[in-house]
Amino acid sequence: MKNIKTLLVLLALLPQIIFGQDLLDEIDLETADNFETAAFKGLKVVNFESTKMVSEKELYFVVSHRFGSIKTGIEDFFGLDQAVTRLNLIYGIADGINVGVSRSSFQKTYEGSLKLRLIRQKKGSFPLTIVWYSSAQINTFLDEETLPGLEFKHRLGYATQALISRKVNKNLSLQLAPTFFHNNLVSVTEQDNSQYALGIGGRHKLTKRWSINMDYGIHLNRAGTSPFKNPLSVGFDLETGGHVFQLHFTNAQPMNVNNFLGQTTGDWGNGDIFFGFNISRVF
């Protein structure tokens, strides 16, 4: 019941978005074929993927950085000494088809992804944009010495999301992201390997170059003994021509789907949150 109330409150308040090169003018215009322009400028809604796609033959290079918890204070310079970095390349191989590859320092994770646009929001016709997103990751941090019997299959994880967005007006866009993810090895004994979550997010434009962003993930079958939390992130995006900067606060330090949904440790109520930023460049 608590999760349902939280969902309703966030759906009423939502805001969000990231990235994009010189897309500020484009985002508020209708296309000639009457499709709505992208609900989001960025490829992510802070943590969750958005329905934004990389255009055909474009290459995005995204650098994501999360410091450690600010709760530690000056001892490690508010998390500076405990940073996590993710480098991500995304290429548009065709209109509505993107592939990506990334490496994160969190658990030395490598990931490949596929993103497909199934349908676009169109005025007077279909009210939503729907995108399919799938990823597979390899955890190379696991050690055979500490985990006897470890096999390659135990390093693998998978995720699939249906990204459903609506551009409500020129300033406000909302998104739902029903998510399935599976880890062949879980750290909590009672936790099912196959897990389910619902992501909600949004963007609200404040000025031509600034927007406020939010997303939240509700884990639907987390084990009762699990120490992990639902990820909640709030941030601001600034577009500066060839670059977009996203500045945010979140209780999730990891950035891959399986990890921020299944292994978020921070607690907003205790001030255990992480400052981070994303920078994207289009080639």
Image (cartoon, rainbow, N blue to C red):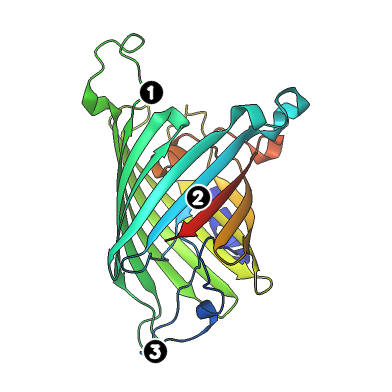
In terms of image quadrants, where is residue 121? Answer: bottom left
User: Crowding at label 1, few (<14), some or many (≥20) Cα neighbours within 10 Å?
Assistant: few
Please name the residue shown 42% across and 57% down the image: 60
SS assignment at label 2: loop
| The one of 57 and 139 positioned closer to us in this rendering | 57
195 horizontally vs 209: left or right: left
Return the residue nearer the eye: 190 or 136: 136
- Quadrant in which the C terminus is drawn: bottom left
Q: Circle 2: is it few (<14), some (14-19), or many (20+) Cα within 10 Å?
A: many
* Residue tagged 1: 141
Relative to 251, residue 15 above or below: below
- Upstream in the sequence, badge 3 or badge 2? 3
Q: For the point 26% across and 17% down, which residue is it? A: 150
Q: Is residue 1 visible?
A: no
Q: CA distance from mark 1 to mark 3?
A: 48 Å
Q: Amino acid at mark 1?
A: Phe
* x, y percent for residue 170: 57, 80
Q: Please, is residue 261 above or below residue 49 in the view? A: above
Categorize mark 3 by other alpha carbons within 10 Å: few (<14), some (14-19), many (20+). few
Q: Earlier in the sequence, mark 1 or mark 3?
A: 3
The circle on residue 34 is 3
The residue carrying mark 2 is 47
Residue type indicated by callout 3: Asn
CA–CA distance in space, label 3 to label 2 = 30 Å
* Residue 249 on image: x %, y %: 64, 46
Q: Is residue 150 above or below residue 244?
A: above
Number of numbered discs on residues: 3
**Viewer-nearest residue: 181 or 245:** 245
